[in-house]
Amino acid sequence: MPFQMGVPSQTDFPAKTWHRLMANAARADRSFSQVYGDPQGEQELRVQIAAHLAVSRQLRCHPDQVVVTSGYRQGLALALTALQVTGAEAWIEDPGYPLGRRAMELAGLCVVPIPVDSEGICVAEGIRKAPDAKIALVTPGQQAPLGVCLSPARRLALTDWAAGRDAWVIEDDYLSELQLDGRAAPALASGPDADRVIHIGSFSKTMSPVIGVGFVVCPPLLATRFIEVASTLSPAPSQTIQRALAEFMSGGHYLRHLRKMKALYTFQRSIAIEGLTELPATIETSGLALKIPLLDHADDKRLALRARELGIAPVPLSAWYASPSNATPGLLASITNIRADNCETACRELNELLNALLKQ
Ligand SMILES: Cc1ncc(COP(=O)(O)O)c(C=O)c1O
């Protein structure tokens, strides 16, 4: 649906190339023995991921540090199982990705919401509220959902805190280098003091969730432990898909696709901003979405439900807050499926809703 969050463009998946590479990989399966693959992930894909991260995220790692997963969420489950931190406190960003918060609770962690400002997570506030936390789950590249990049000072403060307290920082790099304004900031795990940062990536946004591939880059200290957990509990996904993806990357298709999507999403964002005219306050850009602030008394959950009935799917910003008292109402509207052929209608529907709200 137009404005739906969390999904890439439905019309620009490189289907022809992908299907050809999948067919090649499936044919090659016949000449492979029918045995289990490497639970850590196929070596050829791990090599491609490590090489890509060095260029795109300035993250230098050895392919042996890479564990292939079915996406970010499997990577998070793998990390939480390997770290054995049940019962400990965990910082989460507030606002933050609701499933990240729930994942911490399911893993038996005591969630401590930490506010986010224009520099990213407020590390000093985290230290004040829960100095002995064992985990900090963050989106340093483009904070979900506010879009801000963690400032250099906060990066340092976060990694210093983790080093001083034997804590771990989990970096959710869900958008990778898909940053629409300028060049993406280096991964947190690329820093000189990042040996306590676990970097989790995913191809769900940069390619498609249909592929179902992600990865973890584990600090060398933890690699053996992560591989043991992958081998026993959560082995890497289908070898056929991994081989097709390795070919897609080594053939330069992935880089070309990312370049194309950045240009396309930038265009789509500009036509959406132009089309949305009935705004209560200044619109903000945030990752692949627009953040539409609403007036204080507005019920953003009701507004989002009403929008669904009209065939558009922005989501309420307040739902991303763990502490309801901190929540500010707003709508998050993804631009990934706003195209020249549906922009006018989608923006008209949203304008009418916002206009009706302003008149209340
Ligand atoms: C902030 C954030 N992290 C992670 C994910 C999930 O990634 P995956 O599909 O690889 O599990 C999403 C999906 O929308 C997200 O918004």
Image (cartoon, rainbow, N blue to C red):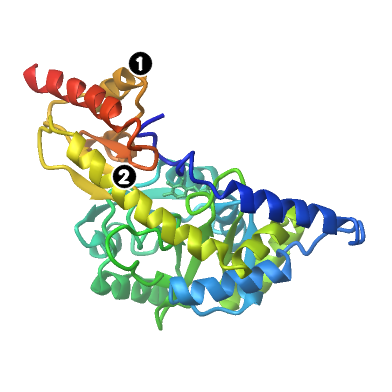
Q: Decide which of 28, 115 is in the foreground and name it.
A: 28
Q: Is residue 98 visible?
A: yes
What's under tag 1, amino acid-wise? Glu
Picture coordinates of residue 89 (x, y %)? 42, 55
Give the image location of residue 17, x and y in percent.
63, 53
Identify the residue at horizontal 60%, vertical 65% (top origin). Answer: 249
Which residue is most to the left? 359
Q: Quadrant of residue 65?
A: bottom right
Query: Is residue 130 left or right of 41 when viewed as pictured?
Result: left
> Which residue bears the numbered disc 1?
309
Q: Dot 1: what SS?
A: helix
Residue at 51 percent across and 60 percent down: it is 201
Contact (CB < 8 A) between labels 2 and 1?
no
Give whichever of 286, 166 is nearer the camera. 286
Label 2, label 1: how many angstroms apart (C-alpha)?
Answer: 23 Å
Residue 44, quarter of picture: bottom right
Give the label, 2 or 1, closer to the camera.
2
Q: For mark 1, does the 10 Å Cα neighbourhood hold few (<14), some (14 to 19), or many (20 or more) residues?
A: few
x 39%, y 77%: residue: 164
Residue identifier under label 2: 268
